[in-house]
Image (cartoon, rainbow, N blue to C red):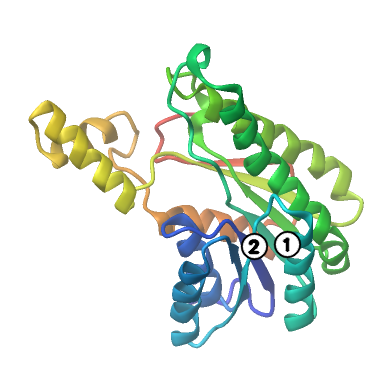
Amino acid sequence: MTGLLDGKVVVVSGVGPALGRAVCVRAGAEGARVVLAARTASRLDEIAGEIRDAGGQALTVPTDITDDAAVAALVESAVGEFGRVDVLVNNAFALPSMKPLARTDFEQIASSLDLTVLGALRVIKAFTPALAEANGAIVNINSMVIRHSEPRYGSYKIAKSALLAMSQTLATELGGDGIRVNSVAPGYIWDDQLKWYFGEVAKKYGITPEQVYKQTASRSDLKRLPEPDEIADAVLFLASDMARAITGHTLDVNCGEYHD
């Protein structure tokens, strides 16, 4: 624990069991008071319990970021509980359809944009006054999908590319208010979901999960895959005062699989 975020209030939207959890727990360990927002209340309570057990402060606010009233309630709860908001991390996203664009339903693309892009924008707009008062920071979680055009990732790339364009525009628009806007683009994240997936791939091809890992990791410079805490560390850096002169930037965290 270094106290990188001592005294700061960090709101994380789209808290999931892997990266979202890691960001919340690591932020708490670095001295932040953490506000956790997602649709699944039981998951929020579990992660908030981890933060409190380690001596930190956490507030859970079940939130649907596609709903204006729910987002307004999130802002009211966060500011009402802690009096300020210094950092907003947007982690919510919709799973890609994993079909070629020619066979992807327009409704799937639209729902992905609604959550990933418009949902993030809705949360950012709602928190802008509080963040301006604190000279705060926004970190949007993107993906290495913006660096490649592999088959079946088309709808996901559309959403994440739009999120990147929006983040860059907001960095310019909100800079005058003292708000920094940056993005983190993870590669594969070595979490339980990916471990399960590699297990399924191994069954399909009659090899071991370790071989799947080695083949996948061989495409990166470091010959391994990043873990959730390592992605979270990049998020916390951009959220902290150590990055106070950085805005409009995208930080790739993929062990060197792709170079920008």
176 displayed left or right of 103: right
Between 1 and 127, which is closer to the camera in this rendering?
Answer: 127
Real-space Cα distance between discs 2 and 1?
Answer: 6 Å
Residue identifier under label 1: 70
Q: Mark 2 points at which residue?
A: 63
Residue 31 percent coordinates (x, y): 58, 79
Give the side of residue 104 with respect to residue 137, left or right.
left
Helix, strand, or loop for circle 2?
A: loop
In the depicted structure, whether residue 1 falls above or below residue 196: below
Q: Could you say which quadrant of the image residue 80 lies in? A: bottom right
* Amino acid type shown at disc 2: Thr
In the current view of this chain or complex, which residue is farthest to the left?
206
Residue at position x 54%, y 41% from top? 94
Secondary structure of the residue carrying tag 1 is helix
Q: Which of 3/116 is in front?
A: 116
Kind of residue at badge 1: Ala
Q: Farthest top residue?
A: 102
Q: State the residue at coordinates (53%, 69%).
A: 41
- Residue 99 placed where, x, y %? 44, 21
